[in-house]
Amino acid sequence: MAGIDRQITLRFLAEPADVNFGGKVHGGAVMKWIDLAAYACGAGWSGKYCITAYAGGIRFVKPIHVGNIVEVSAKVIYTGSTSMHIGLDVRAGDPKESARHLTTHCIVIMVAVDDEGKPTPVPEWIPQSDEDKALRDSAIRLMEMRKKIGAEMAAHVAP
């Protein structure tokens, strides 16, 4: 049911096919897992099919090793009229142990769309705790920064 579940955790096992030339899981595999978790979170919150509008601020903090269990936690931290800002943390560790360490963090913006692919309204998320209010405020500040960066980047893409 839309507007009820604002967070989800997906788990993956880092496989040999996910390895880069340095022997660690490559960023592309991590980004795929992030996108899958962001979709599941956005679709769960909105009750609609969602598309990725933005993925940014990705920070690769520590490497992920083959054989690690990888947990990608996603939660809605801000909603617009048709968009959801989703904060994601990636944690990994030995599956035989309970400890997981933070490896990656980022924000993804998902947009709910209707059957014709047009943006469609999402339920509003209203933060209750101080921590959630801080996350919402951070999402709003990041949105303002992205607008400024977009204006600067326009000079690089304009013919």
Image (cartoon, helix red, strand yellow):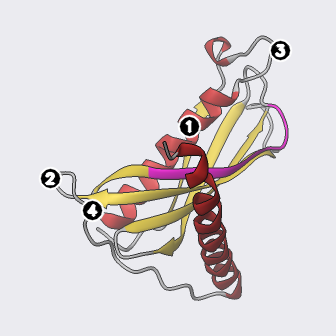
Which is more foreground, mark 4 or mark 2? 4
Residue carrying label 2: 115
Mark 4 vs mark 1, foreground winner is: 4
Q: Which residue is labeled 4 in the image?
A: 119
Check whether the beta carbons of the residues at disc 4 and disc 3 lie within 8 A of each other.
Answer: no
Residue segment shown in magenta: 53-63
Dots 1 and 3: beta carbons under 8 Å?
A: no
What is the secondary structure assignment of the residue under circle 4? loop
Task: Name which residue type carries label 4.
Answer: Pro
**Kind of residue at disc 3:** Gly
Q: Amino acid at mark 1?
A: Trp
Neighbourhood count class around disc 2 (C-alpha, 10 Å): few under 14, some 14–19, many 20 upward? few
First of labels 4, 3 by sequence position: 3
Report the side of 74 relative to 115 (left or right): right
Quadrant assignment for the N terminus: bottom left
Dot 3 alpha-carbon crowd within 10 angstroms: few under 14, some 14 to 19, many 20 or more? few
Q: Cα distance, mark 3 to mark 2? A: 43 Å
